[in-house]
Amino acid sequence: MPHLIDCEIVMHQEIAPEHFRLVLRGPEIAREAKAGQFCMLEVQAGLYPFLRRPMCFERIFPDSFAIVYRVQGEGTRLIAKMRVGQTVNVQGPLGKPFPLRREFEHHVIVAGGIGVAPFPALAEALIRECGAVPEVIVAARTADQLVCEQDFRQMGCKVHLATDDGSAGYRGFASDLLRELGLQENSVVYCCGPMAMMKATHLVCEAAGALCLASLEAEMACGDGVCLGCVVEANVEVEAERMVRVCTDGPVFDTRLIQWESY
Ligand SMILES: Cc1cc2nc3c(=O)[nH]c(=O)nc-3n(C[C@H](O)[C@H](O)[C@H](O)COP(=O)(O)OP(=O)(O)OC[C@H]3O[C@@H](n4cnc5c(N)ncnc54)[C@H](O)[C@@H]3O)c2cc1C
Ligand code: FES
């Protein structure tokens, strides 16, 4: 069962324009959280904004956890105003984590924009639990939107940068850069970012025979499988439906399970 607890803000820093890292003390959640899972933050006590906002665990510590977020709309604008010492009500951990696939030799992380959020925790888990140091592609529109690069470098990961405008690293899409890394059947790719980028990543992996695991985004209301607000179309039947719920069946999916045509 996920916990529902008040967590104290122990750190809150702007790490890039409109991008923040928030560290929350919440031992019950931190002790159970795994890379790829997420939590739901209450933006403000009371009725507005009504819905909690889903956020991945960027780092998991013994008694606390970090979230990296981009200001998107009203909810994240309010979160950005929160101060150290304040408390936030948090529900979590929710969803299924990234499976740690020890049998693969080549682990590659592909992060698009704020889709980088779950990956410092995943890289740490792969290194600690599988002895596998992943290669990481960090992609964004422009150089100033690239976040977490140094975190991966400090862990010893080989980092490749890609920007749409060429202001840092490779000029172009993360999926084109991924193709150049020479994926094989012993490669597993973990990706998160805009749906179009994850579709392109899925296609590159499919062509190379590599396994692709994606953390999907969807608008969420309940976060625990009830409202069906977060469904995406699937290629296979799950409980007599060709739909999966991102909150409870995911957010991490083998990309072969997802119907990518409409993206
Ligand atoms: C499992 C999961 C993990 C996520 N992890 C992160 C993270 O670590 N860092 C981060 O910056 N963002 C993350 N997001 C996206 C983040 O939840 C949205 O950007 C945020 O909810 C937007 O809220 P807002 O009020 O600022 O924006 P608004 O656009 O004003 O939000 C309005 C409503 O739409 C929903 N909504 C809008 N955009 C999204 C979206 N892209 N995904 C889900 N709900 C949305 C909001 O919950 C809210 O109910 C995650 C989303 C999911 C589903
Ligand atoms: S958010 Fe309600 S079912 Fe997924």
Image (cartoon, rainbow, N blue to C red):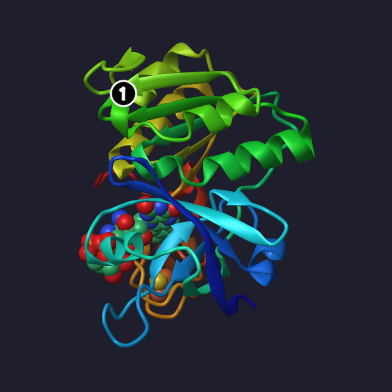
Mark 1 CB lies closer than 8 A to ligand 1: no
Q: Nearer the viewer, residue 59 or 1?
A: 59
Quadrant containing ligand 2: bottom left
The percent coordinates of residue 30 (x first, y second) are 66, 62
Which of the 4 image quadrants contains residue 166? top left
Q: Secondary structure at mark 1?
A: loop
Residue 218 shows in this picture: no
In percent of width and height, residue 204 lies at 42, 25
Residue that appears at 48% across and 35% down:
148
Placement of 196 over or under 225, stated as above or below: above
Percent x, y of residue 153: 58, 24
Give the quarter of the figure containing the C terminus: top left
x and y, in percent, of residue 81 in the image: 32, 63
- Count of numbered circles on the image: 1
Q: Residue at coordinates 30% horizontally, 81% vertically from top-left?
A: 50
Q: Residue at x 50, y 68 (%)?
A: 85
- 75 shown above or below 251: below
Going by the image, does 227 lie left or right of 148? left
What residue occupies the far bottom of the structure in this picture?
Answer: 46
201 is higher (above) or lower (below) than 9: above
Determine the residue positioned at 43% across, 49% down: 13
**Residue 132, picture quadrant:** top right
Q: Quadrant of the N terminus?
A: bottom right
Q: Nearer the viewer, residue 16 or 221?
A: 16
Residue type at the position of mark 1 = Phe
Name the foreground residue: 79 vs 263.
79
Check disc 1: other Cα within 10 Å, few if <14, some if 14-19, many if 20+: some
For label 1, the residue is: 173
